[in-house]
Amino acid sequence: MAERIFIIHGWDGYPEEGWFPWLKKELEARGFTAVAPAMPNPRKPTIPEWVSFLQQRIGIADEQTFLVGHSMGAQAILRYLETLDGAERVSLAMFVAGPVTLTPAAYVEEGDEETAKPWLETPIDWGKVRLRAKKFIAIFSDNDPFVPLADADIFRQQLDAEIIIEHGKGHFSGSDGITELPSALAAVLKHAAAG
C-alpha cells in the first residue's frame, strides 16, 4: 500500500492556497497518495466538526499515514491524534505554524476570538498524542505575526518534536507569498526513507 499523506489547511484556508498544491504535487511525483481536503466551515472551525471530518477522511490510521497541518490544521491533527486508540498510530505528524497560543494580531474580524477560544483553551492530552505518531516535526517562522516562536518549545517539550525554524516566512500563508515549502518536503522524504 502506498504511503498516504493528508495536507490539512488552517482556519479560513483552502486546499489550493499557498504551498499546499506544490507539496501535494511533489509528493505525488514521488509515489505518495496525497490528499488535501477542503475542511468544513473554514471561517468558523470547530474541534468536533474538524476532528470528525478527519476521522472520516483518514479511516484507519497506520504506519503508512502521514499528516501535515498548517496553522489550525495542526491543532486539528493534535486533537484527531488524541482520539486514536488501540494499535492506531501514524508514521509522521508535521505541524507548520501550529498554534498552542495566538498573538492578538490573529484576531482580525469580529468573532475571531470566540472561534479561537475552544482551540486554545480545551486542554490537549499531550501524553496520549505522543503515543499516536512515530515522529513529530514542527516548523515555525521567526516572524510569524500570529503564532509566537515560544510555541516551538511546547512542541519540543511535550512531543519531543524535531523543530525547524524558518527565517522570514510569516505565517507560511499564500498571502505571505509562500508557494513552496522545501523544508517540509525534505522532512517528509527523510522520514519516509528512514522507515
Image (cartoon, grey):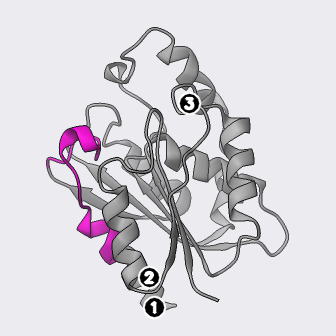
Estimate how packed mark 2 is, as few (under 14), some (14 to 19) or many (20 or more) residues with alpha carbons within 10 Å: some
Q: Quadrant of the N terminus?
A: bottom right
Q: Residue 187, image x and y in percent? A: 36, 74
Residue 120 bears which disc, if any?
Answer: 3
Please identify the quarter of the rendering in which residue 184 is found.
bottom left
Is residue 143 in sight in this rendering? no
Which amino acid lies under the numbered mark 3 shown in the image of this protein? Leu
Left or right: 132 with respect to 111? right
Segment colored magenta? 168-186
Q: Which residue is denoted by mark 2 in the rendering?
A: 191
Residue 184 is a magenta residue: yes
Look at label 2 and name its amino acid. His
Task: Please say if 18 is above or below 88.
Answer: above
The tag earlier along the polypeptide, 3 or 2, is 3
Image location (x, y in percent) of residue 38: 54, 47
* 186 relative position to 46: left or right: left
Nearer-N-terminus badge (1/3): 3
Based on the picture, tell me whether residue 97 belongs to the magenta stretch: no
In-image side of 129 versus 159 (left or right): right
Q: Secondary structure at mark 3?
A: helix
Tell me the CA gap for discs 3 and 2.
29 Å
The residues bearing labels 1 and 2 have C-alpha atoms spaced at a distance of 5 Å
